[in-house]
Amino acid sequence: MYKKGIVWLYLFLLSALADMALIIHAVPNYRIFSKPLIVAALLGYFLYSTKLIKGSLLRISVAVALFSSIVGDILLLYPHLFLYGLGAFFMTHICYIVAFKLTQNHTFNPLKVNFIKMFLYNLPIYILAAFVYFLIQKQLFDLKIPVVIYLLAIVMMLTIARERYGRTNNSSFWQVFLGASLFFISNGLQAMDKFFFPIPDGKILIMGSYVLAQLLIVMGIRSHLLQFK
């Protein structure tokens, strides 16, 4: 079963390399095939390797997150569809928030939450998000409200990923947290590249961090499930 499942990962790797090559050689038209195939392969791997939890909310939320990412990847290839792409990735972050909550070994009790401690732990994330918004806000115009809402969603995704510390195994925590961090970095670079100042080799940096982010998140969720086998 493992050998059959790893075929999806090979497809993921080949698609990612092909997409990077198309970016380097400035052949954007063919990315309509390579870019969505990256996460589609990862979705195939996730569905294949989680058959034992078929029908569960966790499996559905991660599958919807990955499917929304595929839709977002396609839409963002066309500049005039940017807002729709943003909406698709907003759904991705919401679904990942649900998945990260479901992969914590504890019962949430709002009466026992230390909000001051939580705020201080998350403060570096808030500062980085605010800094990115400060850099791009003058160029957003009509997109200000959608971008702010999207920014809040990705910040929440990253803080929920950090919250998993000590509530899952170390492998799952670090994979998911690093994946969520790279997702945040990728989005931050994309925002600055589009609305602030073009970043040298920006598309490679954005896509490289994004691809690794998706892989780490999926592997981290899988690592959480493996502890119960």
Image (cartoon, grey):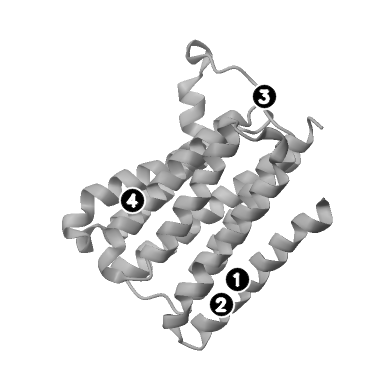
Total marks placed: 4
* Amino acid tagged 1: Ala
In depth, the one of 40 and 226 nearer the eye is 40
Residue 114: where, in percent of width, then height? Answer: 50, 19
- At label 3, counting other C-alpha atoms closer than 10 Å, the crowd grade (few under 14, some 14-19, many 20 or more) is few
Q: Where is residue 209, by image quadrant?
A: bottom right
- At label 2, counting other C-alpha atoms closer than 10 Å, the crowd grade (few under 14, some 14-19, many 20 or more) is many
> Disc 4 marks which residue?
87
Q: Which mark is residue 135?
A: none
Per the model, the C-alpha gap separating discs 4 and 2 is: 24 Å
Residue 97 relative to residue 169: left or right: left
Residue 90: where, in percent of width, then height? Answer: 38, 47
Per the model, the C-alpha gap separating discs 2 and 3 is: 38 Å
Residue 63 relative to residue 86: left or right: right
* Amino acid tagged 2: Met
Which tag, 2 or 3, sits closer to the chain's start? 2
Which tag, 3 or 1, sits closer to the chain's start? 1
Q: Where is residue 166, by image quadrant?
A: top right
The secondary structure type at the circle numbered 1 is: helix
- Say which residue appears at 70% left-offset and 40% top-offset: 51
Q: Is residue 98 above or below residue 129?
A: above
Q: Are marks 4 and 2 in contact (CB under 8 Å)?
A: no
- At label 1, counting other C-alpha atoms closer than 10 Å, the crowd grade (few under 14, some 14-19, many 20 or more) is many
Which tag, 4 or 3, sits closer to the chain's start? 4
> Disc 3 marks which residue?
105
Residue 10 relative to residue 39: left or right: right
> Disc 2 marks which residue?
20
Per the model, the C-alpha gap separating discs 1 and 4 is: 23 Å
Q: Are marks 2 and 1 in contact (CB under 8 Å)?
A: yes
Per the model, the C-alpha gap separating discs 3 and 1 is: 33 Å
